[in-house]
Image (spheres, helix red, strand yellow):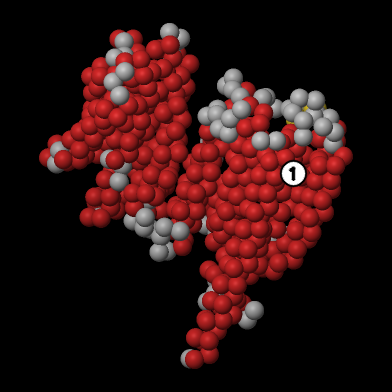
C-alpha cells in the first residue's frame, strides 16, 4: 500500500474536495443537536443560573484550540521529516482556524468570567497560557509568510510550531499545578460530576467544532494548494 | 447586566468569528482560482 | 581549541571591539528601570511592590533588544555559512555564540540588577533572589532568543516579527523569575519558582541548541 498516495497536492486536492462538504454537514447536524441539548434540554444551573450555558461554546473552543495546535505541530513534524510540501500546507491551513478557536475561547471565557467571578480577565495560569497560544498561532502565520520563498517559510514556521508545542502541556496541566481561578478538570476519562444533559451538550458541540475545523481546514488547504501549485498542469486543467 | 447580555455576546461573537472565517475562505478560494485563470491566459499567449 | 571555546572567544572579542551594542543594552536597562519610578510616582510601598516585576520586564526588553544582532552580522557577511561548512560540530559553535551573547548581555544585566533594584527600596534578601533569578533566567532568555533570531534571519518584518515570536516564549521565564523575587518579598520561600526556572534552563540547554542549529540550516538553504 502506498502510504504517500495522498501526499501529492493533486491527489489530496481531490480527497479534500470530497471530504469537506461531509465535514460541514456533520458539523451542522452535530451543532444543531448540541445547541438543542445545551440551550433547551439542559436544566438551569443551581449556582450560575443561565449564564453557565456559555460552557457549550467555551469548552469546545478551548479543546479545539489545543487540539488544532497539536495537529498543526504533527503536520509540521511530518513536513520537516519527509520534506513534503503538503505537510507544511496543511499546517498553514490549520493555523487560522486554530487561532479563531483560541480567540473564541478567550472571548467567551471573559464573558463567562464577568458574571461568575466578577472580572473579564484574571491573569491566572490557564488564561495566560491560552493567550500565549494565540500569540504562537499569530507568530506561526507571520513567520510562514515572512519570506519570499514559500518553502523557507514552511520550514521556519514548522520549526516554530514544534518549539511552541511545549505550551500545550502547560495549558492543560496548569489547573493542577497552580491554585488559581479555573477549577480543576470536571470531565475526565474516569467519569464526570456534570449533569448528563450538560455533558452531552458539551460533547456534541465539541464534535461539531471538530467537524467544522476539519471542513474549514480542508477548504483552506485546497485554496493553498491552488495558490502554490498554480503553475502545474493539473491545476491549470481544473 | 443581566445574564442574557453575556450569553448573547459570547454566542454572537462566535457566530461572527465563524462567518468571518467562512467569508475569508470563500474570498481566498476565489482569488486562487483567478490566479489560475491568469496562468492559463499566460500559457495561451505562448 | 574546540568549536565552543572558539566561537565564545570570537564573539567576545567582537563585542569588545565594538562595545556599542553591549553598552546600548546596559544603558537601556538602566534607563527604563529609572523611568518607571518617575512615571509611577515615588511612593515607597508601590515601588517595593512592583520592583521585582518591573526590573524583570526591563531585563527582558533589554535582552530582546540585542537579539537581532546575534546572527545577522555573520549571516550577511557569509561567516555563518563558513562556520556551518567547517568540520566543527554545529551544536558546539552555535552554543558558543549563545554563551557569548549571554556573557555580553544577560550577565551585565544580572550584575547591574541589585544596584538598580535599590531605587525600588527592595530589601537584601529580595535583591539576592532577584539577582539569582536573573542569573538562571537570562541564559534561558538567550537560548530562546537565539532560536527566534535564527528563525527570522533574512525575514521581512524584522524586529516586530522577532518580538511576536520571542516575547510569548519569554513569558514563562518572566512569570517564574519575577514570582520568585515577589515571593521572597512577601516572606514566602522562592524555592519553587527558582527550581522551575532552573529546570527550564536545563531543559533549554538540552533542547534549544539543536533547534537553533536546525533554524540556521533552514536559513542557509
Q: Which residue is mark 1?
A: A206
Foreground residue among A108 and A217 = A108
| The N terminus of chain A, quarter of image | bottom right
Q: Is residue A192 above or below residue C195?
A: below
Q: Identify the residue at the far top of this view.
A: C187
Instruction: Find residue A103 and report its horizontal and vertical position in percent.
Output: 59, 45
Q: Is residue C100 above or below residue A238?
A: above
Instruction: Find residue A219 and report its horizontal and vertical position in percent.
Output: 66, 63
Instruction: Give the residue displayed 79% in from the left and 55% down from the top.
Output: A28
Instruction: Give the residue displayed 62% in from the left and 58% down from the top.
Output: B21
Name the secondary structure under disc 1.
helix
Instruction: Find residue C174 and report its horizontal and vertical position in percent.
Output: 41, 28
Q: Is residue A7 rendered to the left or right of residue A211?
A: left
Instruction: Give the residue displayed 28% in from the left and 20% down from the top.
Output: C42
Q: Identify the residue at the far front of this view.
A: B1
Instruction: Say whether residue B32 is visible.
Output: yes
Q: Identify the residue at the far left of this view.
A: C17
Q: Quadrant of residue A6?
A: bottom right
How many marks are shown on the rendered structure?
1
Q: Identify the residue at the far right of this view.
A: A41
Q: Is residue C111 rendered to the left or right of residue A140?
A: left
| The C terminus of chain A, quarter of image | bottom right
Foreground residue among A127 and A82 = A127
Foreground residue among C159 and A117 = A117
Q: Is residue C187 rendered to the left or right of residue A7?
A: left
Q: Quadrant of residue B16?
A: bottom right
Read off the chain for label 1: A
Instruction: Give the residue displayed 53% in from the left and 68% down from the top.
Output: A228
Q: Is residue A188 rendered to the left or right of residue A196?
A: left
Instruction: Find residue B42 and report its horizontal and vertical position in percent.
Output: 49, 86
Answer few, some or many: residues within 10 Å of disc 1's Cα (few below 14, many 20 plus, some between 14 and 19). many
Instruction: Say whether residue C10 is visible.
Output: no
Amino acid at each position: 500500500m502506498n502510504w504517500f498516495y495522498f501526499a501529492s497536492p493533486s491527489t489530496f486536492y481531490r480527497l479534500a474536495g470530497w471530504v469537506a462538504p461531509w465535514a460541514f454537514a456533520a458539523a451542522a447536524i452535530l451543532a444543531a443537536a448540541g445547541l438543542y441539548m445545551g440551550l433547551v434540554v439542559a436544566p438551569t444551573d443551581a449556582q450560575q443560573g443561565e449564564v453557565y450555558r456559555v460552557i457549550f461554546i467555551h469548552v469546545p473552543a478551548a479543546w479545539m484550540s489545543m487540539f488544532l495546535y497539536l495537529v498543526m505541530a504533527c503536520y509540521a513534524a511530518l513536513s520537516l521529516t519527509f520534506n513534503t510540501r503538503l505537510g507544511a500546507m496543511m499546517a498553514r491551513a490549520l493555523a487560522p482556524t486554530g487561532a479563531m478557536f483560541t480567540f473564541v475561547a478567550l472571548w467567551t471565557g471573559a464573558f463567562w468570567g464577568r458574571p461568575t467571578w466578577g472580572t473579564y480577565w484574571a491573569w491566572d495560569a490557564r488564561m495566560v497560557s491560552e493567550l500565549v497560544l494565540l500569540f504562537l498561532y499569530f507568530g506561526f502565520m507571520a513567520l510562514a509568510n515572512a519570506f519570499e520563498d514559500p518553502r523557507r517559510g514552511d520550514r521556519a514556521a514548522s520549526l516554530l510550531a514544534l518549539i511552541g508545542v511545549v505550551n500545550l502541556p502547560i495549558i492543560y496541566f496548569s489547573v493542577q499545578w497552580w491554585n488559581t481561578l479555573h477549577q480543576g478538570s470536571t470531565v475526565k476519562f474516569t467519569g464526570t460530576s456534570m449533569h448528563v444533559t450538560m455533558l452531552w451538550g458539551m460533547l456534541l458541540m465539541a464534535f461539531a467544532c471538530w467537524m467544522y475545523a476539519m471542513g474549514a481546514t480542508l477548504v483552506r488547504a485546497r485554496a493553498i494548494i491552488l495558490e502554490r501549485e498554480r503553475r502545474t498542469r493539473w491545476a491549470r486543467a481544473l | 447586566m443581566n445574564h442574557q447580555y453575556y450569553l448573547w455576546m459570547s454566542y454572537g461573537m462566535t457566530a461572527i468569528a465563524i462567518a468571518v472565517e467562512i467569508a475569508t475562505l470563500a474570498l481566498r478560494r476565489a482569488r486562487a482560482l483567478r490566479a489560475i485563470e491568469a496562468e492559463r491566459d499566460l500559457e495561451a499567449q505562448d | 581549541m574546540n568549536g565552543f571555546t572558539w566561537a565564545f572567544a570570537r564573539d567576545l572579542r567582537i563585542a569588545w571591539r565594538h562595545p556599542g551594542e553591549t553598552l546600548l543594552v546596559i544603558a537601556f536597562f538602566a534607563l527604563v528601570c529609572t523611568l518607571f519610578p518617575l512615571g509611577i510616582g515615588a511612593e515607597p510601598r508601590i515601588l517595593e511592590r512592583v520592583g521585582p516585576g518591573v526590573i524583570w520586564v526591563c531585563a527582558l526588553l533589554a535582552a530582546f533588544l540585542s537579539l537581532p544582532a546575534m546572527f545577522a552580522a555573520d549571516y550577511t557577511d557569509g561567516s555563518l555559512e563558513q562556520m556551518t561548512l567547517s568540520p566543527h560540530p554545529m551544536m558546539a559553535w552555535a552554543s558558543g555564540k549563545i554563551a557569548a551573547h549571554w556573557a555580553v548581555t544577560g550577565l551585565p544585566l544580572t550584575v547591574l540588577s541589585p544596584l538598580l533594584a535599590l531605587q525600588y527600596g527592595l530589601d537584601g534578601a529580595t535583591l539576592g533572589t532577584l539577582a539569582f533569578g536573573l542569573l538562571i533566567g537570562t541564559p534561558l532568555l538567550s537560548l530562546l532568543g537565539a532560536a527566534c533570531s535564527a528563525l527570522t534571519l533574512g525575514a521581512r518584518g524584522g524586529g516586530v516579527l522577532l518580538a511576536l515570536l520571542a516575547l510569548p516564549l519569554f513569558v514563562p521565564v518572566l512569570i517564574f523569575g519575577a514570582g520568585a523575587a515577589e515571593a521572597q518579598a512577601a516572606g514566602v520561600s522562592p524555592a519553587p519558582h527558582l527550581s522551575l526556572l532552573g529546570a527550564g534552563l536545563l531543559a533549554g540547554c538540552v533542547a534549544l541548541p539543536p533547534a537553533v542549529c536546525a533554524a540556521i540550516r533552514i536559513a542557509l538553504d
